[in-house]
Amino acid sequence: MIKISKNAQKHFISLLLNEPTGTQIRIFITNPGTSNAECGVAFCPENEIEKSDIELKYDKFFVYIDKDILSYLKNAEIDLVVDKLGSQLTLKAPYAKNNFSKKESSSLEERIKYFLRSEINTKLSAHGGQVNLIKIDQNGMAVIQFSGGCNGCSMIGLTLKETVEKKLLASFPEIKKVYDRTNHLHGKHSFY
C-alpha cells in the first residue's frame, strides 16, 4: 500500500523523539479524488486516533490513515530526499486525484454530484458559493440549487448558463436541460 523508505523511517523516528509520548504519524489527503487533492503527513497524538483509522506498524512508530482514503494511497511512496541544500520529505500518491466514482457502476446522479463537487464547486468556492444536484427527472432535466455567495448574486444567470449548464450538458449527454430551483434572495451573503 504505502512504501516508506528507510531514510524516511529514520527521519520519522528522530522527529517523534521530540514529541509527547504516544505521538505517532498520520497520512492524510484533503479533497481526495478531485483535481485539488493534496497529500500530507502530520503528527498524530494519541487522542486523535479514530476508530475508523487503519494502523500500519513500522519499527518504533505507527502510521494512521483514515480507511476511507486507502484507495487514493495505492502505490504511495514517502521518501527523504537529501541534497546540498538540505533534506525534504516527499509523499507521492499517484491515485490521490483519481475519481473512483467514474466507474460504470456509479449512477448518473452520483457521477453528476461528483462532477459538481470537483469541477464546479472548486471554482464557486472562491466566491463563497456552491451548487448541488437536487434530482434528475425522467425527461433528463437536472434540477440544481445554488447556495452561499451564489444565492442572489447578480451574476448567477451567467454562472448558470456559461459554467454549470454548458459543462453539465457537454459532460453528460443524458442531461437535456438544467433547471435552477434556487429562491435567489440578494443579501450580504451574495457575492455580487
Image (spheres, helix red, strand yellow):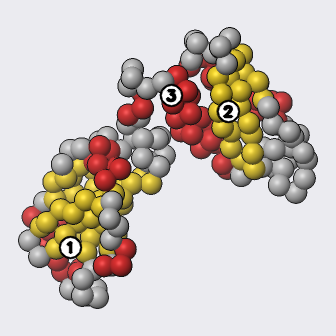
Can see residue 90? no
In three-dimensional space, the C-alpha distance between marks 3 and 1, rounded to whole angstroms, equals 39 Å
- The CA distance from mark 2 to mark 3 is 13 Å
Tell me the residue that label 1 is attached to: 12
- The mark nearer the N terminus, 2 or 3, is 3
- Disc 3: which residue: 111
Query: Does the rendering let one see residue 26?
Result: yes
Given the current orientation, which residue lies at the most extreme right position?
Answer: 186
- Do the numbered discs 2 and 3 sit on residues whose CB atoms are within 8 Å? no
- Give, as a three-letter code, the residue at label 1: Phe
Tell me: residue 56, above or below residue 2: below
Q: Quadrant of residue 52?
A: bottom left
Mark 2 residue type: Ile
Q: Which residue is mark 2?
A: 134
Front-most of 82 and 67? Answer: 67
Point out residue 79 in the picture as x, y percentages from the top left corner. 19, 59
Q: Amino acid at mark 3?
A: Arg
Above/below status of 156 relative to 137: below
* Mark closest to the chain's N terminus, 3 or 1: 1
For the residues labelled 2 and 1, say whether their Cβ atoms are less than 8 Å apart: no
Decide: few, some or many residues near mark 1? Use Cα within 10 Å; few <14, some 14-19, many ≥20: some
